[in-house]
Image: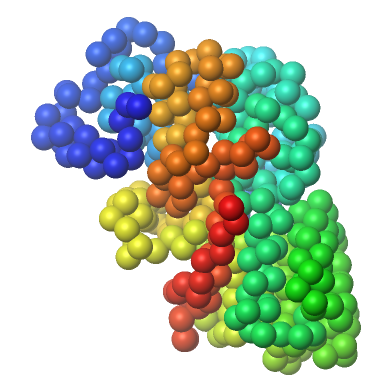
Amino acid sequence: MGITRKSFLKSMAAIIAAPLAGVPARAEEADILVGATVPMTGPLSLTGLQYLNSLKMAEEDINKAGGIRGRRIKIVFEDTQGSNSTAVNAYVKLAQETKPSFFFLSSYSTQNLAVSPEVKKVQVPAMYAGGVDAIAEGGNEWMFRLRPADSLAALGMVDCVTSVLNAKRPGILYIQNDFGQGGAQAAAKALAARGVGIVGSEAYGQNDKDFSAQIVNLRNRSADAVLLFGYPQDMALAVRQYKSLGMKAPLVGSSSLYVTATLQLLTASDIENTFGVLDALVDPSTSPRMKDFVDRYQAKFGTAPDPYGLAYYDGAFLMADAMRGAGLEPVALRNWLAAQKAWDGIGHVYSYDDKGNGVHDVVIVKPKANSKTLELVKKVSIN
């Protein structure tokens, strides 16, 4: 294996001491092109900007550390906006015009599902972060997931409800799309397996602004905890309405609840008595490598990174190691990634199964008292 993240800081120090040391030895060779389809505009850009920033930072870091066997990488971005058809067009445009050696896809499951057939035709490895289980179940050997599957995240939420809160009458509130419906169904199934029945399951549309009817229904059924599956904008609205309607039952949110885009729309008071399940706790105190990532991201972009951004930063370094280890031939790249069983990233140790799932753990977190700073409650892993 070439330069790993563990040796990255050492390499950076050497570059600072001798600025020309990191210049590609064969600068005359063309850059290695990488395609990235990212929601850069529209409502999904709230989280999309996190991995846009992270990929730009990773591109810069990888090139400063010597690139790939002396060649620089260049990430070419296309905007998926907020629609599946635009996501497909963005991917096809990159595949036909840029012809990259690798792809990063949107973190939104509905866009990943729409693009998957095209990825299968193009036959170039792609990393993605959508959590819907159906993406991996589709059997696309060219797609590698960077985040926990929704079934694992739902299992973490259920673990919070049953073992942390000891709730007996939970309800579910979810956005009506592949992500929300899939998460709600997985949670209900996991609760049933633990002998806990739900008192109600309420859905809302992606563009809805008023969730009071659904929340009141759960209140009238005496829910003693509510699981919430949504995206940043709708989750922020739902949390505020949940509080304004006097709901006292703890709220357990999916991964979007505590991402930077959502927390920017909420106060510390809004998130009192809430819990959440995240891919990883992006806390500088957890490790020197996490501190380096968080500090440099904040200094560069003026905002805190979230687990989505961290996933793509890890993914870019994993891609770089794959290119150093296997070269650029697509099948060799794919096989190298599929063989990874303990690649040590900042957020996770990535281990790919036969469906392209690389992450097998989540964390349950909650905000500290009178604060939006998160603290670890427990880690949940599956073998």
Q: Position of residue 40 (x, y in %)?
A: 60, 43
Along the line of sight, the residue nearer the viewer: 323 or 13 = 323
Q: Is residue 68 above or below residue 191?
A: above
Residue at image position (51%, 66%) is 379
Along the line of sight, the residue nearer the viewer: 136 or 81 = 136
Coloring scheme used: rainbow
Q: Is residue 88 above or below residue 353?
A: above
Left or right position of 222 against 130:
right
Along the line of sight, the residue nearer the viewer: 213 or 173 = 173
Q: How many marks?
A: 0
Q: Position of residue 94 (x, y in %)?
A: 63, 22
Most distant residue in the top direction: 28
Q: Position of residue 279 (x, y in %)?
A: 55, 57
Q: Is residue 85 above or below residue 377?
A: above
Is residue 84 visible from the viewing direction of this image? Answer: yes
Is residue 316 visible from the viewing direction of this image? Answer: no
Residue at image position (80%, 56%) is 182
Residue at image position (40%, 49%) is 346
Most distant residue in the left direction: 17
Residue at image position (79%, 69%) is 193
- The image quarter containing residue 144 is top right
Q: Quadrant of the N terminus?
A: top left
- The image quarter containing residue 232 is bottom right
Left or right position of 218 against 294:
right
Q: Position of residue 22 (x, y in %)?
A: 22, 25
Left or right position of 141 against 306:
right
